């Protein structure tokens, strides 16, 4: 048998490499817990509770503020430990008092925050809830099936459309009124998220631009911000993101 016909040999990993590999597999396999614990914290209202408590709260404070059963305190401690590790919250050295970080600051309920809008940033709660909704999770879970499916050319559906039968931004009303409202609100706050900073730091992107159309399907927040920063740019807003599909040479696939 020729040397080229022989199967390539695999190097046997060392014990240290085996341990590291196992740790990496666990890290990737369980990484979804990071986003799910974030979703849990938002649903419970933990960022808002800490904000209302003066910016720092203990576990008993949170149990009381969130009206949780006292028996859940040990489990809340584990949840907060993971959220601190993820950078969502900060804690003191003893791990008994929790504070907001720049991340969780933007997860405070806008109605509860003393300054709900900071430099164009809105509360990102709708965006977090929309991005971690069951519709998005089902889409990711169906990726393998999407890859195996032989779709007719030239425009295969996106993974989201393949699983749910609707596009994620244009026809979410078919998912139900509550889900549609969540996606639209998530899109709105995402569009408004720090746009003032983007316009300051990336002004050169708009050099030579004379006109543009905001086709994001939102309420025109981005277009208004651009028009204010660049008065010479003519801005239009279209409520239909499907308009992008018909722009020759422009690929939009969510």
Image (cartoon, rainbow, N blue to C red):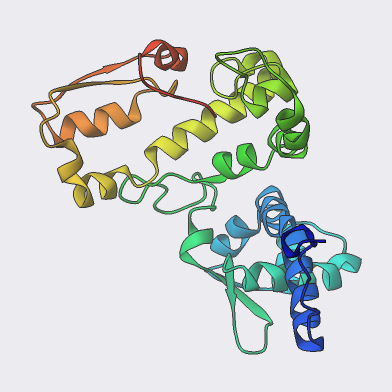
Q: Position of residue 193 (x, y in %)?
A: 40, 44
207 relative to 237, above or below:
below
> Could you tell me which quadrant the C terminus lies in?
top right
21 relative to 220, above or below:
below
Q: Residue at x 72, y 60 (%)?
A: 4
Q: Position of residue 125 (x, y in %)?
A: 57, 45
> Could you tell me which quadrant the N terminus lies in?
bottom right
Nearer-the-camera pick, 30 or 50:
30
Left or right of 11, for residue 170? left
198 relative to 213, above or below:
below
Left or right of 234, for residue 57? right
101 relative to 173, above or below:
below
Q: Residue at x 66, y 55 (%)?
A: 38
The extreme front residue here reads 1
Nearer-the-camera pick, 90 or 71:
90
Count of number-bearing discs:
0
> Quick check: can you spot residue 86?
yes
Q: Position of residue 241 (x, y in %)?
A: 45, 17
Question: Which image quarter: residue 178?
Answer: top right
Left or right of 203, for residue 251? right
Question: Which image quarter: residue 41?
Answer: bottom right
> Quick check: can you spot residue 61?
no
Q: Position of residue 60 (x, y in %)?
A: 75, 72
Q: Residue at x 67, y 18 (%)?
A: 177
Question: Which image quarter: residue 75?
Answer: bottom right
Q: Residue at x 77, y 66 (%)?
A: 25
């Amino acid at each position: 048998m020729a040397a080229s016909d022989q199967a390539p040999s695999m190097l046997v990993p060392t014990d240290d490499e085996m341990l590291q590999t196992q740790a990496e597999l666990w890290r990737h396999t369980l990484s979804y817990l990071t986003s799910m614990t974030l979703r849990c914290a938002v649903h419970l209202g933990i960022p808002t509770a800490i904000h209302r408590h003066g910016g720092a709260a203990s576990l008993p404070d949170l149990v009381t503020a969130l009206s949780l059963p006292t028996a859940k305190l040990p489990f809340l401690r584990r949840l907060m430990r993971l959220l601190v590790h993820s950078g969502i919250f900060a804690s003191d050295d003893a791990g008994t008092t929790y504070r907001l970080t720049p991340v969780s600051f933007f997860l405070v309920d806008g109605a509860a925050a003393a300054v709900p809008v900071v430099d164009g940033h809105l509360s990102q709660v709708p965006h977090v809830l929309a991005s971690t909704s069951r519709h998005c999770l089902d889409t990711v879970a169906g990726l393998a099936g999407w890859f195996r499916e032989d779709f007719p050319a030239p425009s295969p559906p996106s993974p989201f459309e393949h699983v749910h039968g609707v596009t994620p931004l244009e026809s979410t009303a078919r998912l139900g009124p509550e889900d549609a409202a969540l996606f639209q609100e998530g899109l709105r706050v995402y569009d408004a998220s720090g746009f003032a900073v983007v316009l300051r730091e990336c002004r050169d992107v708009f050099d030579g631009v004379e006109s543009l159309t905001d086709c994001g399907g939102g309420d025109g927040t981005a277009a208004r911000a651009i028009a204010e920063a660049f008065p010479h740019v003519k801005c239009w807003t279209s409520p239909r993101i499907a308009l992008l599909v018909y722009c020759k040479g422009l690929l939009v696939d969510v």
